[in-house]
Image (cartoon, coloured by chain):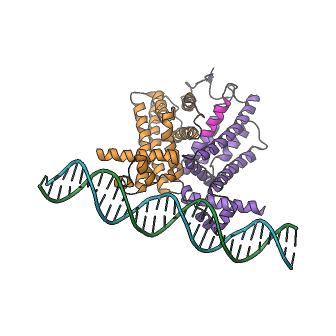
Chain colours: A orange, B purple, C cyan, D green
DNA sequence: TAAATAACATAACAACTGTTATGATAAAAT
DNA sequence: ATTTTATCATAACAGTTGTTATGTTATTTA
């Protein structure tokens, strides 16, 4: 209860420091200062820095995943998949901080095999989620039946990842409707050929 | 000559440490040790660590860009654009190290506005290159004339970035022919309607 | 040949790092 | 009411960091 809450407060303080100072400059002392307390709090709720970092990464991912689930409920068909993807895109400025932490952790994983495996687990998990959605669409004959589900799920994730990275580096690179347009077009390229059409906005 | 060569040797040693130990653990001493010499060499060829890191990032980008230019020469039309993109993809294992350093620097930029601006410059430069290629294709009526060139260039870069990141995290995620297939399909979605396998509503 | 500079090595510097131990205080449990 | 536990503060630890100064030795240059 109160225990878990405090753990989350520490984690959120860590996020803020990561975004403001950089992941490698996010020291125990910096987190404690951001939290307005001493390092005793940090060391009390986390065995060591590794555990804190792993938990922080875990929370970022779960926040994104929760948003995906929420956007999926009650929807069906192509729109369901679309909304699930839209949920993780940095459509508004409020989505950028999460992406910043995500990109920071991706770079931080280079040279840290343990963290790479953590990322692998999460990408694999995401892939399975999208894969299942694609399989449902395939069963409903809404998308072509000759496509490689795993490949297409990974491709969709790659596009989202690229857009997220682009926005992190340059917030004005992709406007919200441009992000949606690109994802929609990508998904439409999977549609059954009879229905295949791309409406071009001008 | 010999001056510049030595600078590059230091930079390459830095790359190896970055890939093996992580960017934040790439200290002056670690680079010197990787080079088989003392820190005196490193401090002699670089004013400070910032200059070294900036130069290392610069070199990674220029290596990728050189490969792009090489793959473009002598080619024309859609194939030219395709080959330019293929050149920067991690199609073989030999392309992965460069991408690892790239991803490491992307994450390293979070919380470092100066580095973010460096990345912006490079993404903008890449965008202009692709933009020019798309404009040429448009002038030759090989792709539709109603597409937003900047958006499509950024989208192509985002896809490549996503694939590169995916391969860095999981080398088996995208096989070479899958990478090529995804890029080819993305480019085909820009083709003029008469040649396109996808019908376009206007 | 003499002087100047480039190319390194070594060492010391203060600042910062994660970790750990020790206390203090408040809440909970007995 | 007493003991235990949770919560936090403080401080010291050994190790690492970038930077800088001071050497030493080649290589150019004049």
> In terms of depth relative to the viewer, which is nearer, A68 or A42?
A42
Q: x%, y% of residue D17?
A: 55, 61
The residue drawn where x is 66% and y is 43% is B122
When asked about the image quadrant of residue C21, the answer is bottom left
Q: Is residue A86 visible?
A: yes
Q: Is residue A149 visible?
A: no
> In terms of depth relative to the viewer, which is nearer, A60 or B164?
A60
Q: x%, y% of residue C23?
A: 29, 62
How many marks the image carries: the answer is 0
Q: x%, y% of residue A193?
A: 57, 27
Residue A102 lies, with reference to residue A83, above or below; the image says below
Is residue A186 within the magenta segment?
Answer: no
Q: Quadrant of the C terminus of chain A?
A: top right
In the image, the segment drawn in magenta is B145-158
Q: Quadrant of the N terminus of chain A?
A: top left
Q: x%, y% of residue A15?
A: 45, 45
The residue drawn where x is 57% and y is 28% is A181
Residue C23 lies, with reference to residue B142, above or below; the image says below
Residue D22 lies, with reference to residue B49, above or below; the image says below
The residue drawn where x is 55% and y is 24% is A195
The residue drawn where x is 64% and y is 38% is B184
Residue B44 lies, with reference to residue B132, above or below; the image says below
**Chief SS of the magenta region:** helix
Q: Is residue C27 left or right of residue B145?
A: left
Q: Residue furthest top?
A: B202
């Amino acid at each position: 209860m109160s225990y878990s809450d405090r753990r989350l407060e520490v984690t959120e303080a860590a996020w803020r420091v990561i975004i403001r100072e950089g992941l490698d400059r996010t020291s125990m002392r910096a987190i404690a200062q951001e939290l307005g307390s001493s390092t005793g709090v940090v060391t009390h709720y986390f065995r060591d820095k590794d555990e804190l970092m792993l938990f922080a990464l875990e929370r970022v991912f779960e926040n994104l995943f929760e948003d995906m689930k929420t956007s999926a409920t009650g929807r069906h068909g192509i729109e369901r998949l679309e909304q699930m993807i839209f949920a993780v895109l940095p459509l508004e400025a409020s989505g950028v901080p999460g992406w910043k932490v995500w990109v920071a952790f991706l770079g931080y994983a280079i040279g840290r095999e343990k963290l790479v495996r953590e990322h692998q687990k999460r990408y694999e998990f995401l892939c399975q989620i999208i894969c299942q959605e694609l399989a449902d669409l395939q069963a409903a004959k809404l998308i072509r039946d000759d496509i490689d589900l795993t490949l297409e799920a990974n491709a969709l994730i790659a596009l989202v990842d690229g857009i997220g990275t682009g926005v992190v580096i340059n917030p004005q690179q992709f406007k919200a409707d441009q992000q949606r347009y690109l994802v929609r077009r990508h998904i439409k390229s999977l549609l059954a050929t009879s229905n295949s059409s791309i409406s071009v906005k001008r």
